Amino acid sequence: MRVLAIDTSNLVLSVAVVEEARVLGEMMTNLQKNHSVRLMDSISGLMDELNLLPDELAGIAVAQGPGSYTGVRIGVATAKSMAWALGIPVVGVSSLQAVAMNAAGFSGGIVPMFDARRGQVYTGGYRTQEDGSVALALPERIVLLREWLDALSEEWGDSPMMFLGDDVAMHRDLIAQRMGRRAVFAPAAFNHPRAAHIGWLGIRRLAEAGSPHDMVPEYLQVAEAEAKWLAKQNG
């Protein structure tokens, strides 16, 4: 079974083709370039390198957020369109879980994080499982970082916690100040989401997939423009 995996939910653009037991190929860039322009070329280039045709794919897995509204929509819309055209299933994988997978095997709490501005972060708490994956232990949310650190202290006490994600660097001082020796910071190479992880997680969920039209992005909050529109309607 071969699955195409896609992530455009944040700055990183990553695509991969995976099987149950191996990664056939993966491409990733961490540049501020237009995902909508580069995604299909990236998929086509990887498929050509692997000498694979689209009809050899058994399914598609895509990062469905949270993250950049535009980035999430690009990835999800592309995955759904391809799945519908090819007649294959598509599944969504949490963008935060994809980052957390980089710390699989860590014995403490795993805390992936994306900046959400105004002192807020998209985040959640994960733990390593016996099968080598990571599972959600504290629900994903958008939250003020200070409140989140307090919640982690209350839930996980003195346990070590690994913070990872490209945006952790901008909050590192506050995390270190509040968490002390409990805070472990991932090396730079562990901060980027990998489409291979999305594919590995997604391949196990394909049997549960419904219609491609049923899979929707997970933003964890409404867009600012939508929030203003809703406030105006309610007002």
Image (cartoon, rainbow, N blue to C red):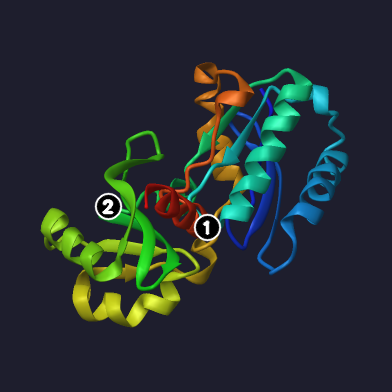
How many other residues sit within 10 Å of disc 2, few (<14), some (14-19) or many (≥20)?
Answer: some
Q: Residue at x 38, y 33 (%)?
A: 131
In the image, residue 168 sits, relative to residue 197, either above or below, namely below
Depth order, front residue of 225/67: 225
Q: Number of labelled discs?
A: 2
- Residue 52 quadrant: top right
214 relative position to 8: left or right: left
Can you say whether 50 is above or below 185 in the image? above
From the viewer's side, name the closer residue of 66 and 186. Answer: 66
For the point 24% across and 62% down, the residue is 148
| Residue 100 % position (x, y) | 42, 52
Residue at numbered disc 2: 107
Q: Is residue 55 above or below residue 35?
A: above
Residue 6 in view here: no
Using a 10 Å C-alpha cutoff, classify the residue at mark 1 as few (fewer than 14 neighbours), some (14 to 19) or many (20 or more). Answer: few
Residue 82, image x and y in percent?
75, 30
Disc ID at residue 225: 1
Secondary element type, mark 2: loop
Task: Locate residue 212, reporting x and y percent.
Answer: 63, 24
- In the figure, is residue 6 to the left or right of 206? right
Type of amino acid at the residue the image marks with label 1: Ala
Which residue does the image show at 55% across and 54% down from the upper left? 193
Mark 1 falls on what kind of element? helix
Task: Give the mark, 2 or 1, whose residue is nearer the N terminus.
Answer: 2
Where does the image place residue 207, in percent across and percent down from the top left?
Answer: 53, 17
CA separation, marks 2 and 1? 41 Å
